[in-house]
Every structure is written in C-alpha cells, then in structure tokens.
Amino acid sequence: MSTQAKSNMPAGLSGNGALPSWAPLALGLLLLYVPSFYDMFTGLWATEEQAHGPIILGIAHWLLYRNWGQMLAVSEGERGSPLGWPLLLLSVLVYFIGRSQGIAIFEIGSYLGTLMALILLMRGKRALRAQWFPFFFMLFMLPLPGSLVDMLTMPMKTAVSWVVGNVLYWVGYPISRSGVILQIGQYKLLVADACAGLHTLFTLEALGLLYLNIVRHNSLFRNVTLAILIVPISFISNVIRVMVLTLITYHLGDAAGQGFLHGFAGMVLFVSALLLIIATDSLLRFGASDKEALPLFASDAGPPALSANYGPLRMAIPAALLMGAALLATIAIKPQKMLSDSQPAIALETSVPGAFGDWKIDPDAVAMVPSSVQQEKVAAIYSQTLSRTYINSRGQRVMLTIAYGSNQTQSMRAHRQEVCYAAQGFQIRDLHNENLVFDGLPVPVTRMVASHGPRNEPVTYWFTMGSSVVRSYLDRQIVQLKYALSDYIPDGYLFRVSSIETDDKAAFALQDAFVNDLMKHVTPSVRAKLIGAPA
C-alpha cells in the first residue's frame, strides 16, 4: 500500500521524502539575492543611467518562464551534470566578493552563474542549452565599473554632441559645443551617460535582441546583420533624443528640459529605436529568406511545472547549504563602519595653508564656477573640495584641487581626471604614469597634458584610499578588501595640480617643487592622507 502511495506522488515532490527538490534551491536563491536586488532597485537601478536594469531583469525572467516547458522536455531523463558544482562554487565566491566589497557587477553577475549552475546540477546540459538566450539577455543588466564606462562612453557622447551641435547650427540655432557640453542660447547642457552613453547602447542592443527573439527569423544573415546594425541605430536614436531635449530646453526653458519632458525625450529614444529596428528588419527581408535556415532564437512556450522532476533532493540540499554559507560569510565580513568616523576630521580649508615657502594664494585668480549638473555630480562623490591658485615670487602659478570623499566604495569613487577634462572639450595627450618623490617616498601619480584651443595645461594627479595611494582598479580593490577585513569603509582624496604652460617639462618640474613645498608645511596626519606618507 505504501508502494502505491509513493508511485502516485508527483516526481518533483518525491525527492527523498515530501520536500520538493526545488524548495531548498528556491530558499537559497531568495536569501542570497533578495537583499541584493533590493539594494539595486533603491540604489544603482534608481538612477537614470541604470534604469534599464530592472526592465531587463523582468524580461529575462519572463523568457525563462516561457522556455521552461521546452527545457523540461529536452532534458527529460537526463541526469544532472557534475560541472554544476565548480560553477556554483565560483558563483558563490564571486557573490561573496561582490556583496562584501560593494562590487555590483560581481554581485549581480553571480546571479547568472548561480542559476546556470543549479540548472546544470539538477537537469543537465541540455536544460541549460534550452535557456541560453535568457541568460545571455541578462548580461545587459550587469552594472559595469564606472572607469570602464567612462572610457568607452566618452567617444560616443562626443560624437553625439558633435552631430547635434552641427545639425542645429546648420538650421539656424545659436548653439556651440565644448566637448560634451552644448551651449544653446542662455542654456548649457551636459550630454550625460543616460542621454548618449554605453548604458543606452546596451539597452537598445538588448531591445534589438529581444525583437529578434520574438519575431523568430530563421535567416542567419538577417539575424546577425540586424544585431550588428543596432549599434548605428542606437547612435541615431541618441542623436534624436539629445536634439529633442536641446530644443525643449531652448524653447520651453531649463525646468521643462529637466522635468517631465526629459523623461519624454527618453521615450522618444526608445520609440525611434524600435521604429528604426523594424524599418531595418523590413529592408533586410528583401535580401534574406527565412525558409531554409534553421531557427536561431525560437523556443517553445510552456509554464514551469512545480510537479516536474527537478533532480534528487540529495543534490539540492548541499547546493542550498553552500549558498547559505556564502550568505553568512558575507554578513560576517561586509564592512559596516566608516573609516572617516574613527579618525579626527580634516578640514581642507584650514589644513592646507594659504601661504608657505615662496608660495601664496594668487589674489587676482578668478575661480571658475562649474555648471549645476557638474556641481551635482561632484557633491554626490565628494564631501569636501578645495580649489586654489598659488603664485610664487617669480610670477609662476600652480592650480591646486583637493577633493575628499568619505565613502570610497565602488559606486562612490572619484573619477579619472582625463575623462573629466575630455568631457569639457579638452584634448588629452601624453597620458602616462610616473613617481613623484617626496622626502625619499615615491608617490605614484598620473600625468597628462590637456589642451583646449590656445590653452595648454599639464596636469599631475593621484588618488588615495585610506592611507594608501592607488593608481589602478586592482590597487583600489586590494585596499578596499584590506579595510573590509577590519570592518571599515575607506575614505579617499583626489589631489591634482596643474599649470597653464607651453613647456610641459618645465610645468611638471614646477608642480613637483610645489607639492614638495606644500607637504613640508602640512601636519603629518594631513600629509599621510594626501600622499600616503607615514604620519
């Protein structure tokens, strides 16, 4: 009688008892990733630049749901693959690093790896192959490191700004351009990442691939060609959006441009992109037939069946325990305290002397006032800024900028200066790394020459985190991890000196002398923060 009862029980609920094998896996996923996605929804994904993230997440899960029936059908009778274990171990390790150190691309990227590993473990390779497109689609929601986005986005923003500026000038509008800043009439507009950046390109590329997946063309040529053409379609759509936003601001005012109509311009972007994709697809129809090619993106619809056999419970429980261990380890190591709260506060205005050695503040220097958009960006990263121009007895001038940020996690880090200068229309050349030596201590610095028309500005700058000077992305991660092990979130400084000088070599030598003089006249604690020297 007991044998008959067991045979009537749904396969997915049998496991080793009444507990369905998918239940511990679902619990592990919820415990790991609900806090992560909550932080993303209230943090990065709430910003205009990353607003595509939750949309892609939702569509990807719908695609998983739609393909579920096909996945169960093709993997019927197949045993789980042991390859799922190393992938799961790697994924929870990446989650641990990303969650504890605030590295969003690791934290959210581990979600893909964890889901893939669980499918491999419980249903095998054919099941994972059936779900390849939803996982590929999820790649577009990953938040890339800011330094990489800045490097890849700047050429696109500059090109969009150039096209918009020239087109509107040709039709008679009073517009000029400096880098990615457009001046039309009395209004100055900064072409931001959300308007013409890498995030927008990713969103539109995802939109195009989703279109291909839905229409299900069988022609390889048609699918590949359309996927490639989405890049220029994205560029044209960005030009249309920035042009619409610029005209709204010029005719209706800044409040209209930054208010509801700013969102309307975003709608224009996606509507124009979708129309261009459909139009391009229609043109490609005349050059490619769908009759003989094998389907690329087609999949059978079918909802998830909770009563299906999702694998043995003996595989599900260790996997769930591994996810639980990663969660506990993350809670144990994730820093909760700010390093800035554990040390005496440093006020830049009073800690940096107005006169020292042969240098004093230039009373004739005119401070440049950044735009409101730039001020908002600076305020979001830095809690203190100091900008001064010093002059010596020979009439030589050095511009000094020091900015302090109390939170140097991944999303709040200072930006590289070559990106900031390029955004304001400067041409960057001779970008290189050197060591500036103070009292026998080498300080790793970055040097470049920024030029804008007749202005030639050699620049020296560096970043600190805690009491260490950091140059590369890896340097920052190592320092951040070191402080995390002590339960601290590090603070940091940007230190920059520059000169208006045609002789680059002489300008850098003058900046070295200025920095050495300055460091001799600040307190040891301030010097330790600014150049990583022992206090």
Image (cartoon, rainbow, N blue to C red):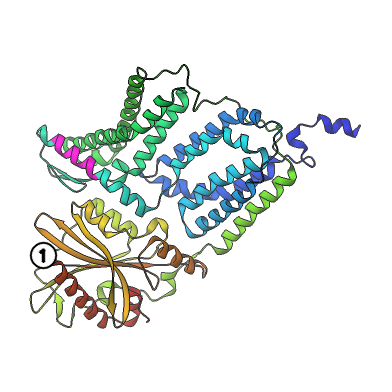
x, y percent for residue 193: 31, 45
Image-based side of 213 in relation to 263, left or right: right
Q: Is residue 307 above or below residue 189?
A: above
Residue 161: in magenta span: yes
Instruction: Work out which residue is located at the far front of the displayed protein and give it.
Output: 292
Give the quadrant of residue 276: top left
Q: Residue at x 36, y 74 (%)?
A: 345
SS state under label 1? loop
Q: Is residue 129 visible?
A: yes
Which quadrant: the C terminus?
Answer: bottom left
Report the predominant secondary structure element of the magenta stretch. helix
In this orientation, does residue 398 appear? no
Q: Which residue lies under the disc numbered 1?
A: 502
Residue, x 55% and y 57% (percent of image)? 96
Q: Where is 20 relative to 478, above or below?
A: above
The extreme right residue here reads 1
Q: Can you say which quadrant of the picture contains the N terminus?
A: top right
Residue interval drawn in magenta: 158-168
Q: What residue sits 27% from the left and 63% below the top?
A: 432
Q: Position of residue 391 (x, y in %)?
A: 12, 74
Task: Rate crowding at label 1 as few (under 14), some (14 to 19) or many (20 or more) other CA atoms within 10 Å.
Answer: some
Q: Amino acid at mark 1?
A: Thr
Taking depth in this image into account, of 369 and 528 the one nearest to the observer is 528
Indicate yes or no whether the magenta region holds residue 465.
Answer: no
